[in-house]
Image (tube, rainbow, N blue to C red):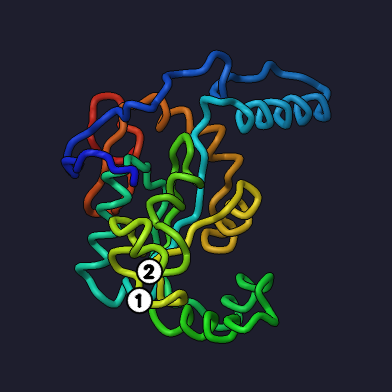
Amino acid sequence: MPKGPRLDRKASYRSAWWPGPAAGGPGDSYPNSTCGSQIAQNLEWEMTSILRSPQALQLTLALIKPDAVAHPLILEAVHQQILSNKFLIVRMRELLWKKEDCQKFYREHEGRFFYQRLVEFMASGPIRAYILAHKDAIQLWRTVMGPTRVFRARHVAPESIRGSFGLTDTRNTTHGSDSVVSASREIAAFFPDFSEQHWYEKEEPQLRCGPVHYSPEGGVHFAAPAGGLGPA
């Protein structure tokens, strides 16, 4: 069960897995050109290079389900698990999910025996959504969560989130994306104003190279501006 040291929530830190700045990188500017298509091709090529770079941070969606949000101590414990495993919290919001949105989100499970129960549960109360960043965000978050089935989680990963707090296979505390493709789709569903491309071009290099601070008030990490501690 991966665990990082408990963080000082008011302190800045540079994670051990941050590899440092990449050569080239998203901050490079482009010379003036009369060929708009060439600029577009350059931007597309650069974005592809960033996403394929082994140094780039990976994004994933994490949800805390209504059963956990309803209990402040469990909600805070899960939040601390995110911090202690050295995820960067890129965005965070709490919302009450509409039933129609739940149905769209879980469309791939439509027709299965648990579909209706899952939809009704996820629309039953507030949830908390995160965009998390880490060099291996998707797999690490799934490991931290533990197996989907709570009975199995309690036996094979008792210190995982689901092993500690899960009630049933539906009320299992958390959700996480299972692939890069699903992460992009799910992030867009919960954070429609978030541009993954813009984040990789502008924010990712700053967060990866540091220094980075955590805001207890906002519950997110931010790249520290020169000469100050406030959000950039």
Q: Residues within 10 Å of mark 2 (few under 14, many from 20)?
A: many
Q: Which mark is residue 177?
A: none
Q: Which quarter of the picture shows residue 45?
A: top right
Q: Which mark is residue 167?
A: 1
User: Which residue is identified by label 2?
Assistant: 173
- The relative height of residue 173 versus residue 229 in the rendered view (above or below) is below
Query: Residue 50, percent across and down?
Result: 61, 28
Tell me the residue at 61%/72% (across/down): 106
Q: Residues within 10 Å of mark 1 (few under 14, many from 20)?
A: some
Q: Secondary structure at mark 2?
A: loop
Q: Nearer the viewer, residue 99 or 168?
A: 168
Tell me the residue at 56%/21% (across/down): 25
Q: Nearer the viewer, residue 67 or 197?
A: 67
Between marks 2 and 1 in the image, the one whose residue lies nearer the viewer: 1
Can you name the residue that lies furthest to the front here?
Answer: 155
Q: Which residue type does callout 2 highlight?
A: Thr
How much space separates mark 2 and mark 1, taking CA atoms? 8 Å
Q: Secondary structure at mark 1?
A: loop
Q: Is residue 107 left or right of residue 84?
A: right
Q: Is residue 49 left or right of residue 202?
A: right
Quarter in which the C terminus is drawn: top left
Q: Which residue type does callout 1 highlight?
A: Leu
Query: Residue 166, percent across and down?
Result: 35, 70
Tell me the residue at 31%/27% (across/down): 211
Q: Which quarter of the picture shows residue 230?
A: top left
Q: Earlier in the sequence, mark 2 or mark 1?
A: 1
Query: Residue 127, percent across and down?
Result: 40, 71
- The relative height of residue 204 versus residue 118 in the rendered view (above or below) is above
Q: Are marks 2 and 1 in contact (CB under 8 Å)?
A: yes
Tell me the residue at 30%/59% (across/down): 158
